[in-house]
Amino acid sequence: MAQKAGGAVLADGTLELFSKLVEERSARGIASALRHMITAGEIHPGDKLPTVRDLSASLGVSPATVAQAWQALAQAGMLITRGRAGTFVAHFNDKDQPPRFLGLGGPLINSGIDLSRGTPDPLLLPSISQAMERVTANRDIWTSSYFDEPVIPELDQLLRQSWPFRPDSLTVVDGALDGLSRIIAVLVSFGDRVIVESPGFPPLLDILERVGAEIIPIGLDEQGPLVSELADALVRDPVAAFLQPRAHNPTGTSMSQLRASEIAALLGRSTCWIIEDDHSGDISTAPDVSIGQYRPDKTVHIRSFSKSHGPDLRLAAIGGASAVIEPLIRDRMLGPGWSSRLLQHILVELLTSDDSVSAVEHARDQYSLRSTHIREALLDSGLDPSPGDGINLFIPVEDEQRVLINLAAEGIRVAPGRPFFIGKVQSPGIRVTISALESNPDKISKLARTIAQAVDRSEQTQGIR
Ligand SMILES: Cc1ncc(COP(=O)(O)O)c(C=O)c1O
């Protein structure tokens, strides 16, 4: 490591120190030691690392093991590879994160139509003011002690009755993303392997990269995650697989019962946890399929109420294996402790009163109609949109950047496909949130034609069509 290259210097003796720090001569051990040196300031941004060959020789491990450690650190943004010039400590800056989540955002557009947001139509949410009035008029809603159960009994009962399998443990957190990040904190350590769907939910990919997990992407078809790819990934001893059972974001795919049973059969004696993110909950038209119906011992199922009852309730339930959920509940006691019981009471009201139950059913029907209309119109215009349960659908395009620009010129904003992929973008495309459409077939057809023209123009510029 005393080699100097391009002005980047590693001090003499660093390799020796590094070898001492590597307690476990595995990819994970090597990655942890290097991460320790970076965070402790032993080596600095811009420093050049030894070659994989030199380091593997000096540590007595295979080059593949070192390469795997480098890859995990590169994925976490701590190293950067500059081709033949070598591998360097990156100018790692927490403020630069999370890259994918930010890639989806941007200021709201004032005029035109914004189909990029992934949020429900506010006009289709059940009325919260009525629920609030009823709750505050009728119930004793105040927490009696910091040691009260985190979930109020009425909500606990409703959730258990409607859960797709009998959960060992159940709790409530501040939205599905909070649930995902707390489950990751319990299960995933630096260098662990995890399986995710690709395309998948960008903030999930951000969290996993941030903790330094090695991400194994698997593809999907119209029935859900591909069994053959999942089988190959399971051989690599992952700690968890993160799946979206319904209204997959961005494709709108829902997992079939058959696929859930095939996945459950694959699990066998694997130690891999299945984490299901049912982020669309009651606005999905598909049944509440879960691998927990077959393997409740290995499954943790998250159900969000953001899309059905409002993102500002910030409530999601997590039910399943207690080995994951109980530590999560304990860890949370040292933070927020519980999710607002006031909001939990409101959710109970929303889940039980006739008017809000019908409002959610109405929303589900409207989303389904909007989705069907735009899908049909896009198909008529020569595009090939994904199935589209829930509020999103994905349209494959050759050059998403050009399409985004062409659409912006028409006052239409959609989300880029890139942030949904890990590594190579297998299928470039755009995500269209259909909740922002008006339920007017003529307007929807017109919009679909505009989208198709924008795609067409971008491909003509590329000389594709
Ligand atoms: C797949 C997926 N998971 C989680 C979330 C976040 O949901 P919540 O609002 O419950 O945190 C979303 C939001 O769109 C999502 O698409």
Image: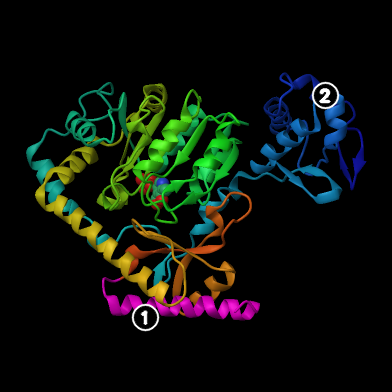
Can see residue 112?
no
The residue most toward the left is 138
The answer to the question of whether label 2 and label 1 lie on touching residues, with beta carbons closer than 8 A, is: no
State left or right for residue 187 relative to residue 173.
right
For residue 387, what is the image quadrant? bottom left
Kindly identify the amino acid type of the residue bearing the numbered disc 1: Lys
Q: Can you say which quadrant of the picture contains the N terminus?
A: top right
Say which residue appears at 42% left-offset and 79% top-offset. Answer: 449
Instruction: Please state the horizontal and vertical placement of residue 46, each as a whole percent of the image.
Output: 79, 44
For residue 315, what is the image quadrant? top left
Q: Secondary structure at mark 1?
A: helix
Q: Main secondary structure of the magenta part?
A: helix
Q: Give the number of callouts.
A: 2
Residue tagged by mark 1? 446
Instruction: Please state the horizontal and vertical placement of residue 318, each as a whole percent of the image.
Output: 34, 34
- Give the distance between the C-alpha atoms of the residues marked 2 and 1, in whole angstroms: 64 Å
**Tag nearer the camera, 2 or 1:** 1
Q: What colour scheme governs how the chains and residues are painted in the rendered image of this protein?
A: rainbow
Residue tagged by mark 2? 59
Instruction: Please state the horizontal and vertical placement of residue 169, each as a whole percent of the image.
Output: 31, 25
Q: Is residue 211 above or below residue 419?
A: above
State left or right for residue 99 relative to residue 19.
left
Say which residue appears at 35% left-offset and 30% top-offset. Answer: 294
Q: Magenta segment range?
A: 438-465
